[in-house]
Image: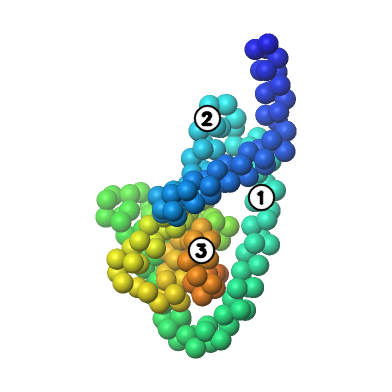
Amino acid sequence: MTASVGQLWVYLQTTPLLWLTVTLIAYQIGNGLFRLSNNNPLCNPVLIAVAGLVVLLRISGTDYKTYFSGAQFVHFLLGPATVALAVPLYAQIRVVRRSLFLLAVSLVSGSALAAASGAGLAALFGGTTPLILSLAPKSVTSPIAMGIADQIGGLPSLTAVLVIVTGITGATFGPWILDRLKVSDPAARGVAMGVASHGIGTARAMQMSPVSGAFAGLAMGLNGVLTAILLPFVVSLFR
């Protein structure tokens, strides 16, 4: 009986549909716990899903390549999901137009601080040059951040991990920090979440309010473009 179960698992382990299903179930479990906790930020659905999947892959001895053969379908949907952020943005276009100047100032200062804070802390604690350069684009969405890291001499694989950690951390603690700082304006909260914690933060901003979600999506996209243009230039100056 044990041998039969083992053979069945070996077969299922290589089936893409298995890991797609497991990924969706893991997120649903995380989302369920998030709601049961009365939306406690420490029960972030993405954090729970990632932790559960890591434990499962570790226990089952499944390598990432095998897992991604199924999870790539979810990965593919990131593109359409990003484009779909234009819908809430269009719904709030009047509010956005009234805030263009403040948005521009917040975007430039936020992008600069996001890049400088990670790189600066790494340098302060004696981090190596590749680590410092890998940390600089940590607040940009993964595909852009990895491209930036590769261009400036960082490690794209390390940057990808740092981006995920940054997004989960921002989505988990961002609203709490904004509350403590008494930032109540939904537009300002959205820009902060979008610039600091990219897609995962934007998803959390969507739960906060439609205005916050619209501004977070806009800030996430513009932050990616701005960082991709300016960060390589700044790094070249220091070199």
Disc 2 marks which amino acid?
A: Arg
Tag 3 near tag 1, CB within 8 Å: no
Front: mark 3 or 1: 3
Image quadrant assignment for residue 61: top right
Label placed on residue 74: 1
Residue 48: percent from left, percent from top: 49, 44
Callout 3: SS = helix
Image quadrant assignment for residue 166: bottom left
Question: How far apart are the alpha carbons under marks 2 and 3?
Answer: 32 Å
User: What's the residue at 30%, 69% (across, down)?
Assistant: 181
Callout 1: SS = helix
Label placed on residue 58: 2
Q: Which of marks 2 and 1 is nearer the N terminus?
A: 2
Question: How far apart are the alpha carbons under marks 2 and 1?
Answer: 21 Å
Tag 2 near tag 1, CB within 8 Å: no
Viewer-proximal residue, 105 or 18?
18
Disc 3 marks which amino acid?
A: Gln
Label placed on residue 207: 3
Q: In which quarter of the image is the N terminus?
A: top right
Relative to 15, say whether 117 is above or below: below
Residue 237: percent from left, percent from top: 40, 69
Categorize mark 3 by other alpha carbons within 10 Å: few (<14), some (14-19), many (20+): few
Image quadrant assignment for residue 121: bottom left
Residue 143 seen anywhere in this rendered image of the structure: yes
Label placed on residue 16: none
User: What's the residue at 68%, 53% (across, down)?
Assistant: 76
Residue 162: percent from left, percent from top: 45, 51
